[in-house]
Image: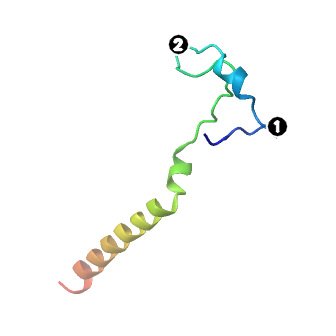
Amino acid sequence: MLDTSRETAPAATDTVADAPVDATVGLRADAPAEEPRGCLFALSQPPLMIFLGVIGCLLLAAAVHDLFML
């Protein structure tokens, strides 16, 4: 499995398997807490920005059509 830890030293696999599991969260007790990612992280993703840009352009084209063509 891919090691995604932020530590410089690789994590030992035998101690991770024996670590107690926190029943309330479902994470291992020695696992570092994930930093919360806000909505700005979600909005910075390229596919979402492309989608929102296309929707914005369609709304702009419809508004310009309504204002100047009708």
Question: Is the residue 23 above or below the residue 66 in the image?
Answer: above
Q: Which residue is located at x 25 percent, y 85 percent?
A: 68
The answer to whether 22 appears left or right of 70 in the picture is right
Quadrant in the picture for residue 44: bottom right
Question: Is the residue 5 above or below the residue 45 in the image?
Answer: above
* Residue bearing mark 1: 9
Q: Residue furthest left?
A: 70
The residue lying toward the viewer, choosing from 39 and 65, is 39
Q: Position of residue 12 (x, y in %)?
A: 75, 29
Question: Is the residue 4 above or below the residue 44 in the image?
Answer: above
**Mark 1 neighbour class, 10 Å CA radius: few under 14, some 14 to 19, many 20 or more:** few
Q: Which residue is located at x 63 percent, y 33 percent?
A: 34
Q: Residue furthest front?
A: 14
Q: Are marks 2 and 1 in contact (CB under 8 Å)?
A: no
Of the 4 image quadrants, the one containing the C terminus is bottom left
**Is disc 2 placed on a helix, strand or loop?**
loop
Comparing labels 2 and 1, the label whose residue is closer to the camera: 1
* Residue bearing mark 2: 23
Kindly identify the amino acid type of the residue bearing the numbered disc 2. Ala
Kindly identify the amino acid type of the residue bearing the numbered disc 1. Ala
Q: Position of residue 36 (x, y in %)?
A: 59, 36
Q: Which residue is located at x 52 percent, y 20 percent?
A: 26
